[in-house]
Amino acid sequence: MNDPKKKTARRWAVGGLLLALALLAGGGLWRSGGGDPMPAQHSVVAATGASAPTLPQPAASAPVPAASPALGGAPSGAAPAGLSARQLAQIEAQWCTHGMQAHRQSQASVFQGEGGAVSTGDPQAMNRVVNALLALPTTQAQTAVRQRMLAAWVERLERQGDPRSLATALYLRVEHAAGWSEAAVAAFRQLAATTTDPYVLSLWQRHDRACWIRGDCRAVPMNRWSLIEPDNLLAWLPPGLGPVTLSEAQWAGVSRAKYLRSYQRDLQLALLPLARELPPGLELDVAMTFIAQLNIRLGIAPGRIVDACAPEAARQLHRQACLHGADLLWRQPQADLMDVAQGLAIAKGLNAGGEGPWPARTAEAMALGNFNATEFHMLDMGAATKVASCDALPTRRERLTDIAQQGSWRVAQREHAPAAR
């Protein structure tokens, strides 16, 4: 069996790479007035998802203080041996003085080594970059701190003892190698198969790749969600990454749904209190990145209703159900920017942009003004585009909590709309 710790470490590096790609990508998504006009596919009205960006040439980095031997510089071709306890302690102690900046500079060197144009469509280049990032001493320090942090979180969640805390602890064990074992996997599967709490079921679906990638939900049948939460629109959508085909019973469930909730923000809100007392430093930096990345959409994402309503037959036969889904996307309590964009896209695809509430909603979205792609994706993940120093980490924690509670759409309105008027 593959070592789950190695698999998780690699997944962590890939997540970090995608985060870096998002940070360094440019281009407008919302744009009004001034500058070159953006292509229609990048407007909020037409957006139905985000394609992986191509990394542009990085801007020149500001000089940073000379790094100690533990921090290192650009990586060599071979990954170094694991850090010693002394080296890890040294990197942690230096993180707020210059370690964070040295890490970014080393990451920029990795990308520059690929000519500054790494595309996620080039598997070999992606593999080289991921391996190079894994080789950075500062990346190894992040991984070590993350493993220590998650182990402590699992222990605290298990001490809390309530069903959601225990389920969250099992999720961290089996999905993020925080004490992985066959027994933990079996316990998690059994809990998901018997639960009446959709939050617990959603955690299992994030873990079960056969289900959320291929739609093969044999371990825990997908129809459990519609049985325990029939009022949730997402409970009626089949999993998988391919085209969506709904049965008449599923379309009826979509039509009757009263709300839409994916529980991704709920997972963030379950973990944010565990990071509340962490002081500024490497561990808080790692905690914020980990929690922010949990909003990467796995399992049954809200965008599945966009896919279900894309075929012409669905638009003709189930127009009202699709408009109802678009309305729930817009009105959900924790709506993200992508949800709002997708709701508008459904309405536009159904030629309903001039009907009912949709003209006002389109105007409300466009009122945000200049809003580039980097801000869009990073705000959806609940992260700031840049944290320049450890002093900014507590503010980032508060902002991430705000976004997890309210959704990025309302936070974006509060932060950007005044500047657009």
Image (cartoon, rainbow, N blue to C red):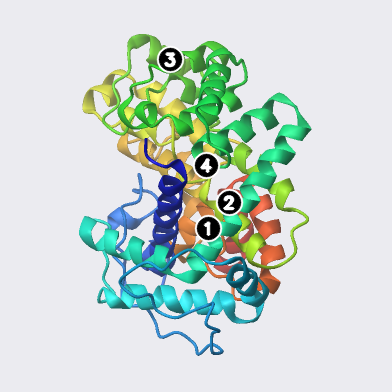
Distance of label 2 from label 3 (alpha carbons): 31 Å
- Left or right: residue 376 versus residue 332 is left
Q: Is residue 333 left or right of residue 367?
A: right
Mark sitting on residue 143:
1
Q: Earlier in the sequence, mark 2 or mark 3?
A: 2
Cβ–Cβ below 8 Å for labels 1 and 2? yes
- Mark 4 or mark 1, earlier in chain: 1
In this figure, which residue is indicated by the disc labeled 4? 177
| Marks 3 and 4, the one that precedes in the sequence | 4
Q: Which residue is mark 3?
A: 221
Q: Amino acid at mark 3?
A: Pro
- Figure quadrant of residue 311: top left
The residues bearing labels 3 and 4 have C-alpha atoms spaced at a distance of 24 Å
Q: Amino acid at mark 1?
A: Thr
- Report the front residue among 71 and 308: 71
The dot on residue 102 is: none
Res 403 seen here: no
For marks 1 and 3, give the one nearer the viewer: 1
Decide: few, some or many residues near mark 2? Use Cα within 10 Å; few <14, some 14-19, many ≥20. some
Which badge, 2 or 4, is on the more N-terminal residue?
A: 2
Whether label 2 touches label 4, CB < 8 Å: yes
Query: Mark 3, mark 4: which one is toward the viewer?
Result: 4
Reading the image, the residue beneath label 2 is: 147
The x, y position of residue 159, in whole percent, is 77, 34
Tell me the kind of residue under disc 2: Gln
